[in-house]
Amino acid sequence: MVTPYIYAGDIMSEDVPLSLRKKLIEMQKRMLLRRSVEKKVEAGRSPLEIVTSVLENEKAREVLEYAKMQYPEATEYALLVLAKLIESGRIKSLDGYLLYNLLHALGIPVRLPSKIKFVKKGREVDISEYLKD
């Protein structure tokens, strides 16, 4: 007879079907792996340090700074998630475009400043200067 709650010590019991034992062992492995990744992140460097270590360019650092300014709490959570993915080996590097899209997918719509520049007589001018002439 199978009990509704199966404890870790009961997995190898003869009462539990083999297919269920295999599933429970796999679930335990995944849970232990997840816990070990969390411990590595908590025990080692901060999530911010982990994420900044894989940023490829200055634009990625800029996107991260604007995200921290606009959404501090949400960005901290996103950094924790990204740090776990980096520690587990799923993310090797992040450029500005990929980081922007990841933050946007996580629900953090980072607004970046944009400027429109025109080239006039060999030099870049702002749109206000261009329209004056």
Image (tube, helix red, strand yellow):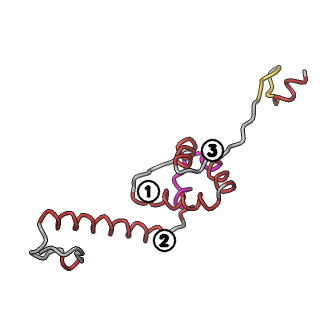
Mark 3 residue type: Lys
**Structural crowding at the residue carrying mark 3, measured as other residues with C-alpha within 10 Å and reported as few (<14), some (14–19) or many (≥20):** some
Q: Is residue 3 magenta?
A: no
Classify mark 2: helix, strand or loop: helix
- Residue at x 13%, y 71% (from the top left corner): 16
The image shows residue 24 at horizontal and vertical percentages of 22, 67
Asked where in the image residue 96 lies, by quadrant, the reply is top right
- Furthest-left residue in this view: 14
The outermost residue toward the right is 132
Give the mark, 1 or 2, whose residue is nearer the N terminus.
2
Whole-number angstrom distance, CA of label 3 to CA of label 1:
21 Å
Report the disc number at residue 85. 1
Q: Earlier in the sequence, mark 2 or mark 3?
A: 2
Q: Pick whichever of labels 3 and 1 is earlier in the sequence.
A: 3
In front of the other: 47 or 15: 15
User: Which label number is shown at residue 42?
Assistant: 2
Residue 57 in percent (x, y) is at 59, 45
Q: Quadrant of residue 12?
A: bottom left
Residue beneath label 3, please? 59
List x then y, in percent, for residue 36: 37, 69
The relative height of residue 98 versus residue 41 in the rendered view (above or below) is above
